[in-house]
Image: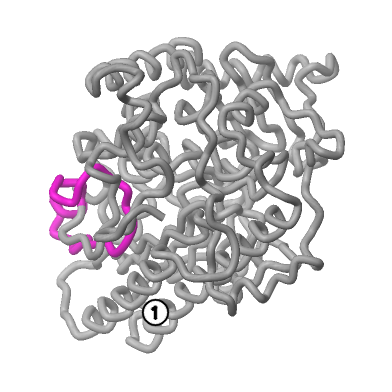
Amino acid sequence: MKPQNTLYIMSDEHNPKMLGCYGHDQVQTPNLDKLAARGTRFTAHYTNSPICIPARAAFATGRYTHETGYWDNAMPYDGEEKSWGHRLQEEGHRVESIGKLHYRHEDLPTGFSKQHHPMHVMDGIGQVWGSIRDPLPDERPSQMLKQIGPGESNYNRYDRLIADEACSWLEEAASRDDEKPWVLYLGFVAPHFPLVVPDEFYDLYPLDKLPPRKLDPETGFVRHPWLQHMDEFTKVDRRLTPEQRLQAVAAYFGLCTFVDFQIGRVLETLAASGLEDSTRVIYTSDHGDNVGARGMWGKSNLYEESAGIPLIVAGDGVPTGKVCTTTSSLLDSYQTVLESVGVPLNEEEQSLKGESWFDLAAKDNDPERIVFSEYHASSSPTGAFMLRKGKYKFIYYVGFEPELFDMDTDPDETTNLAGNPDFASVLRQYEACLRDICDPEKTDRKAKDDQNALIEKFGGREKALNIGTPGATPVPGQGHE
């Protein structure tokens, strides 16, 4: 593959089902649809942990959460584990970021030559209260849907600023004569809550036209006990009226279109600047959002809405209009970026578990590739682990019964096959594969031990309950959303 510039665009909390090119019949994402048409779209792409900080640490390092110990949103990436950005800096490439990274602090060496308008965790500590899991408190009602509907949030203004800065950066890059290909990481916040979006995007989705709720507990759906435990802790959905639930969906749909619009501005500038032919483009997200499915909001579980994410790659050497069903994850970012700019993996990097998305796109679809995700963060009673291989998806919960889904015949994960004797051999095979990656019980204990140590550092459980941003991370220079 010819070395080229790389524009890596990451949104925050984008449900993979909610793009036009992924088949949604209402959500309008014309710019990402165009990108998919001139590139390859992946349909089995996952976060390695469905919450911001662990996901972004995997994206940076190419290593699983249980390998790095960035367990939750109080343990932000700090550059101690080397990232692909460090390697590119060593090789003399220009590597810059614009927007949300959600690392510990701007001043730490995390692999970027320059950070423009970076968003990191509040006060360098994040959500310390979210580390309290051993045992989990009885409840902590979430503030994620305190604001819902049409309007304008600090996040909306921030995302416009990010697009403005990216357009200026690309225009300036077109006039430079860089010796080596550059990498620009672009981090948007939408469609992350607060679910507030300007009227012109909210009004695209009339409440009386919205789809019915999927697997609604109020119409008979019974949650898995692990998920029910989480709902008892966060109490999000039960505090919403039926109209507010519809408003939240409309706002989320609007935010998907809003971020698509900002990305469109950037891609138009890339083309107008004459850089499109010499720049590969990647679009993905850090994790998804439940958007009311199973009566859940936000992320934090391993179902498709939360653990699944979109992935589109386009540019020189990428198959046009292809749909790739090979499993992939954020872990693959390391190999992907290095291959794009022409840097070979060194001996240590060859032991990493990822594989370049450009290589995966060029091959026949691989039904044997394994993708792994795990969750050890806020509101979870125990660790949860996901294995996706071929048509089956296996979810293992420490202390709870597992789940097994046939993603070919049951893509909405409505029927748990784990208790069906006809699938006993599949269940054993997938659990064996999981245990080849990590011991779930030992990993759960290690995560909780590390979190307990952090809590003690902040003065114990009672003090830690009130340490850290209560909701969304503030925009740089602004207060809480």
| 235 and 23: which is toward the camera | 235
The quadrant the C terminus occupies is bottom left
Q: Which residues are magenta?
A: 87-111
Measuring from the top left, give residue 17's x and y in whole percent. 66, 55
Q: Is residue 22 above or below residue 353?
A: below
Q: Is residue 415 left or right of residue 276?
A: right
Magenta span dominant secondary structure: loop
Q: Is residue 284 left or right of residue 213?
A: left
Task: Write the residue at 79% across / 59% down.
Answer: 211
- The reply to whether residue 412 is visible in this rendering is yes
Q: Is residue 240 left or right of residue 93?
A: right
Task: Write the residue at 16% across / 54% down.
Answer: 89
| 182 and 402: which is toward the camera | 402
Per the image, the residue denoted by label 1 is 276
Number of numbered discs overlaid on the protein picture = 1
Crowdedness of circle 1 by 10 Å Cα count: few (<14), some, many (20+)?
some
| Magenta span contains residue 7 | no
Task: Write the residue at 59% across / 74% down.
Answer: 201
Measuring from the top left, give residue 104's x and y in whole percent. 24, 42
Give the image quarter of residue 139: top right
Give the image quarter of residue 237: top right
Give the image quarter of residue 40: bottom right
| 349 and 275: which is toward the camera | 275
